[in-house]
Amino acid sequence: MADFSHKPTLTGDRVVLRPVTEDDVPALLPMFQDPEIARLTGCHTDFDESGLRRWYGSRGDQNDRLDLAVVERATGRVVGEAVLNEWDPDNESCAFRICFAPAGIGRGLGTEATRLIVGHAFEAVGLHRVWLEVYAFNPRARRAYEKAGFRTEGTLRGALLWEGQRVDATVMAVLAPEWGVTA
């Protein structure tokens, strides 16, 4: 099985996924400043531009995760990121997350980006399982994950404390055989 040291460019009809760099921070910054995106992703952290530049500038050196910028083909603009992380080589598994800046939301770009990066996980890296968590107050994301082939596995009750309220997280995953990949 490969690791994530190779940082591919994945091309779809509407998006290109390519290695993210610190030069992408101005386009991604609105993603970290939007209160609704913070709520939907359960992010309690405040990020500053210099910290984000250091973070994104180091992504190319990581062999245990894959951080790709989502670029809208029609405009050439970076509209989000797609990430494979929490790699577990012994179990051929990793986590997946995706997030968009406000300008990229609700336009169907996430479904294609998800299919591209998850396909890469199975077909190029050789993983068996890709999983994620989605919060109960984010049904739009859950529908997008279902369209991409993810299935519900269970619920993490009260996994997030958001503004004094406990919010459940649904664990979803897709397996290589469900994707059409066999070992």
Image: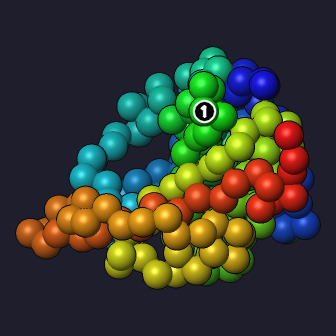
Quick check: 101 left or right of 116? left
Give the farthest residue toward the left. Answer: 164
Q: Whole-percent x and y of residue 129?
A: 65, 47
Q: In the image shown, does 103 or 167 lie closer to the viewer?
A: 167
Q: In the image shown, does 101 or 121 lie closer to the viewer?
A: 121
Rendering colour mode: rainbow
Residue drawn 55% across the image and 45% down it: 95
Q: Whole-percent x and y of residue 160?
A: 24, 61
Quick check: 177 left or right of 33? right
Residue 10 visible in the displayed image: no
Which quarter shows the C terminus? top right
Q: Whole-percent x and y of residue 133?
A: 45, 59
Q: Residues within 10 Å of mark 1 (few under 14, many from 20)?
A: few
**Which amino acid type is shown beneath numbered disc 1?**
Asn
Q: Quarter of the image holding residue 161?
A: bottom left
Q: Is residue 77 above or below residue 111?
A: above
Residue drawn 90% across the image and 66% down it: 13
Residue located beneath label 1 in the image: 91
Residue drawn 66% across the image and 59% down it: 174
> Which element is circle 1 on?
helix
Q: Is residue 137 above or below residue 100?
A: below
Which quarter shows the N terminus? top right
Q: Is residue 130 above or below residue 64?
A: below
Q: In the image shown, does 66 or 134 lie closer to the viewer?
A: 134
Tally of numbered discs? 1
Residue drawn 47% across the image and 51% down it: 29
Q: Quarter of the image holding residue 5?
A: top right
Quick check: 38 left or right of 165? right
Residue 129 visible in the displayed image: yes
